[in-house]
Image (cartoon, grey):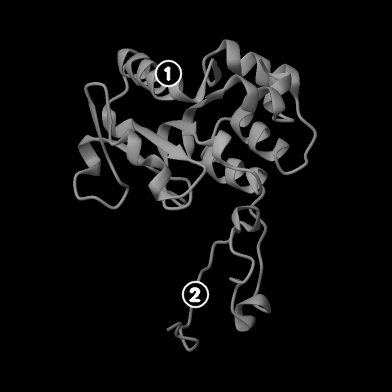
Amino acid sequence: ELNQSSEYFWVFCDVKQAFWKDRELPDFLKDSYRYNLPNNYRCPKPIISLAEAYLGEPINLVEIKKAQSDGIILITSCPSESSIKGKVEIEIDKLLGEGLSPSDIAILTLRGKDAILDFKTIGRHKTVFCDDGDITSNIIADSFLRFKGLERAAIIIVGLELVKTGVSNRMYIALTRALTAVRIISDKKTITNDKILSDLI
């Protein structure tokens, strides 16, 4: 229970990451002093630009295409849904080869926790849920929502083909977990039908 008598009480809120419509700030906080924090310090600018494009902001194709050529953003179109896991393994190996450690990588599905169960082992790589005890030495594989509020250097996004509604909010949350790099992996049909990604492949 919140202590309303506290002399100082700081609340940080990003309304763009709100997921449950029935969960809002308590009324007594809505009337408190507000400070706008306009600058992002977590993600590279192109990743933020891509994330905000999903919320209706104009997309800067030049900026994002450069980020693709620089390896900050990578979109992989797979021939089928069954080939997605193999592509994830390839990207993990590349990221590790570039100097990242398993603890720098998270695989996030845009669906629920059950949708990531097939990724508990990926080739030679072991993965764990974000609330497991050994996350400091392993790749995390979990849902975008359970990982909300956390961050890792490289985020691999899967499960786009499993989502029919609410893609924009899910993508925004998942993309903004990345400190340096994002990899989006789905089947060709899904990526072609995505209003944002179709312009980037």
Give the amino acid type for the residue marked by disc 1 in the picture.
Lys
Which residue is farthest top?
69
Give residue 44's quadrant in the image.
top right
Residue 53 relative to residue 156: left or right = right
Q: Secondary structure under badge 2?
A: loop
Is residue 40 among the parts visible in the rendering? no
Give the amino acid type for the residue marked by disc 2 in the picture.
Phe
Circle 1 residue: 87
Which residue is farthest bottom?
5
Of 99 and 139, which appears nearest the observer? 139
Reading the chain from its start, which is encountered first: label 1 or label 2? Answer: 2
Give how far across and how far down residue 54 sits, in percent. Answer: 70, 39
Residue 98 relative to residue 65: left or right = left
Give residue 105's quadrant in the image.
top left
Can you tell which mark lies on residue 9? 2
Give how far across and how far down residue 102 sits, in percent. Answer: 27, 29
Q: Is residue 24 above or below residue 41?
A: below
- Measured Cα–Cα span from mark 1 to mark 2: 45 Å
Residue 23 relative to residue 52: left or right = left
Image quadrant holding the C terminus, namely: top right
Q: Is residue 30 above or below residue 93?
A: below
Give how far across and how far down residue 98 sits, in percent. Answer: 35, 14
Count of numbered circles on the image: 2
Of 179 and 195, which appears nearest the observer? 195
Q: Secondary structure under badge 1?
A: helix
Which residue is farthest right?
58
Classify mark 1: residues with Cα within 10 Å, few (<14), some (14-19) or many (20+): some
